Amino acid sequence: MKIALLGGSPKPNGGSSAIILEALRASFAGAAEISAASLLRDGPQASLPPLYGAAAWVLAAPLYVDSLPSHVIRFLEETGEFFERPENASAPRPRLYAIVNCGFYEARQNALAIAALKLFAERSAFPWGRALGIGAGALWERFSPGSWFTRGAAGALAELARDALALAGGEDLFVTANMPRLLYYWGANRSWRALAREKGLKPDALRRAPYS
Ligand SMILES: Cc1cc2nc3c(=O)[nH]c(=O)nc-3n(C[C@H](O)[C@H](O)[C@H](O)COP(=O)(O)O)c2cc1C
């Protein structure tokens, strides 16, 4: 069986979505033929043909302003148009699985973006697989998937991987960091302040709202 992994983060290197997809790739090893595309680097048009023919697509994307990054939305629009063309209308659609990670601690922040993906699947006649919303997603960039802090989300990811291999569906999964919310915010604020210092900024600069 062929499974396509779609990277939805615009980050050229690293990033939580890429790390999450690498963890998935490891759990698919030997059980499926994997193709992968970065939706920004490869572009919607370029990335579509190699993905076509996969039994499942697993899209991993960050949450951007309660939605998906614009290039992911463009990819979905172009994909919908591709499958609507008369010559492709009866082509088999891959089953769609989605993993959305966000900066906030609460995994439910990802629910709206997941709802948008389900709507896309419904409108474009893609069979729906399953979704996983991950809170405190930034931790994936700092700690390995096997770490204590990401272990809850890693367990949910393994569940989604099992479902994708079986082309099965299931309830949405929402999982956050294995640490108290206050500790996450304390750590996040600390790293924002350290980044500001590194860039020669005072902590007050973090409270500026230049476009408001
Ligand atoms: C432009 C932009 C918008 C964002 N909007 C949200 C948001 O609405 N809610 C949230 O919880 N996190 C938001 N984030 C944080 C990202 O979702 C978070 O850092 C995520 O872990 C990035 O994933 P990636 O490394 O795969 O790109 C935003 C980040 C950026 C750069």
Image: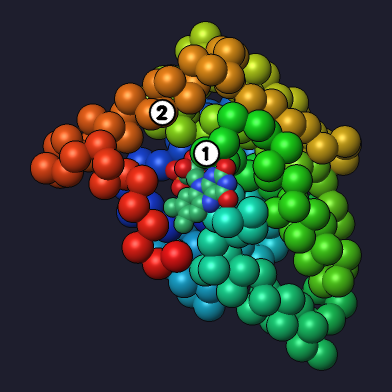
Residue at left offset 52%, top offset 68%: 71
Residue 83: image x %, image y %? Answer: 76, 78
Instruction: Answer few, some or many: residues within 10 Å of disc 2's Cα (few below 14, many 20 plus, some between 14 and 19).
Output: some
Residue at left offset 79%, top offset 83%: 84
- Labelled disc at residue 188: 2
Residue at left offset 31%, top offset 29%: 191
In which quarter of the view is residue 101 placed?
Answer: top right
Residue 91: image x %, image y %? Answer: 81, 73
In this rendering, the answer to whether 123 lies above or below 185 is: below
The amino acid at mark 2 is Ala
Residue 127: image x %, image y %? Answer: 86, 57
Decide: marks 2, 1 in contact (CB < 8 A)?
A: yes
- Labelled disc at residue 103: 1
Q: Is residue 161 visible?
A: no
**Label 2 vs label 1: CA separation?**
9 Å
Q: Along the horizontal axis of the image, is 147 left or right of 92?
A: left
Query: Is 207 in front, or is 188?
Result: 207
Q: Along the horizontal axis of the image, is 156 left or right of 21?
A: right
Q: Secondary structure at mark 2?
A: helix
The amino acid at mark 1 is Gly
Q: Is residue 124 visible?
A: yes
